[in-house]
Amino acid sequence: MTTPATPLLPGSTLGVLGGGQLGRMFVHAAQAMGYFTAVLDPDPESPAGLVSHQHIQTGYEDPDGLARLAQLSDAVTTEFENVPAVSLAALAGQCPVAPAARAVAVAQDRAQEKAHFVGCGVPCAPYAVIETAQQLAAVSADLLPGILKTARMGYDGKGQVRVKSAAELAAAWASVGQVACVLEKMLPLQLECSVIVARGADGASVHLPVQRNLHRDGILAVTEVYEGNLPPALASQAVAAAISIANGLDYVGVLCVEFFVLQDGSLVVNEIAPRPHNSGHYSQNACDVSQFELQVRTLAGLPLVQPRQHSAALMLNLLGDLWFAHGETAQTPAWDAVLQLPGTHLHLYGKTLAKHGRKMGHLNITAPTALQARATALQAAALLGIAPF
Ligand code: ATP
Ligand code: MG
């Protein structure tokens, strides 16, 4: 089952597999609309588990835990793509699940994902699948310099090695344990952007405005969304490509599609995430429907209404690094000073332990104009110790 036969109205229970920050914000959105929630995550202190009505503390593949989640929930979704597709498939035998295991499986595997892009006619980076020594030896020199990415389990730039020569490629493949990988040609990027699409079981979809993203060290740092953040023709092209990728998967739920814009202005799809995405967080404060409310609506089978952005917005990711002065001494970021700036909205995920590179929260900045939003965001960044952008 992917969707309920009739809409699940408030008072029903919505379940989520995974207890990270995306699950937490889904729970908040569901509860705001009057739903009960159930979270499955082994960590007793998981961000979503801490705020959910029910928290099942078992592994993602534990049959009893999954059965309990299905029994408590009227429908179940997922909040991170590395959740085993087999667990989603098992749940789907017991209650409605969206997105479907089949779509999540495609997003989990870079080789399948790229084959899907090709099938949809959306250009992606030239690539080769490397699963065997023969495939490694046969790699075309055209793909170098490139990035070797493990086919599965990568996030925030983890499981990626940049290589310039065949020798470096062989060493990189050995360093990741010769697991299945894709080698992608290194492309000359002008900028990066992404689109959040929400698609219902009837095939109708709505989307958020195109987000312009800045990554640092393979991790999203800043998202900017306002009129003119991208040339309009490019933005329309990205929306059309994202919708065709969702349609091709017969997707139900919230899907994020990440793109590269190359130096020559052409658009290339990078990857998809079968869930709300870090780059869509600005929608919580800048749009009349957030990406998490869209996730609630798609899961419950409620109508989808095209969201409207009412404020120019920037999102700054708050990584654990901000909790360390000069990279060493523990400190509390200057929240009071930041919150004195107009249009700042603080979102923290309830994680007690700050670590370098760990996503602890984000700051949304809204303003009537792009110029004002950017100026405030730069002030906030300076107060927090985030490098200017
Ligand atoms: P996440 O899931 O957190 O978005 P990830 O680990 O899946 O990240 P990718 O999105 O594949 O990683 O890559 C991370 C970043 O590395 C990209 O946003 C981009 O800045 C850079 N990058 C990745 N692939 C390429 C490429 N082929 N050419 C140039 N830059 C690239
Ligand atoms: Mg990415």
Image: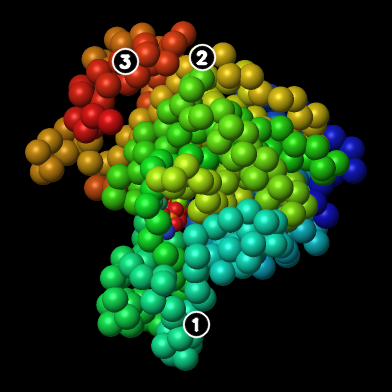
Residue 158: % across, % down: 36, 60
Lower position in the chain sequence, tag 1 or tag 2:
1
* Helix, strand or loop at mark 2: loop
For mark 1, what is the residue? Answer: 131
- Distance, label 3 to label 2, CA atoms, is 13 Å
For mark 3, what is the residue? Answer: 376
Q: Which mark is residue 311?
A: 2
Residue 95: % across, % down: 79, 53
Residue 190: % across, % down: 39, 43
Q: Is residue 347 left or right of residue 251?
A: left
* Label 3, ligand 1: CB separation under 8 Å: no
Badge 1 density bin: few <14, some 14–19, many ≥20, Cα 10 Å? some
User: Dividing the image into 4 quarters, which one contains the N terminus?
Assistant: bottom right
State ligand 1's quadrant.
bottom left
Q: Amino acid at mark 2?
A: Ser
Instruction: Please identify the quarter of the rendering in which residue 240 is found.
Output: top right
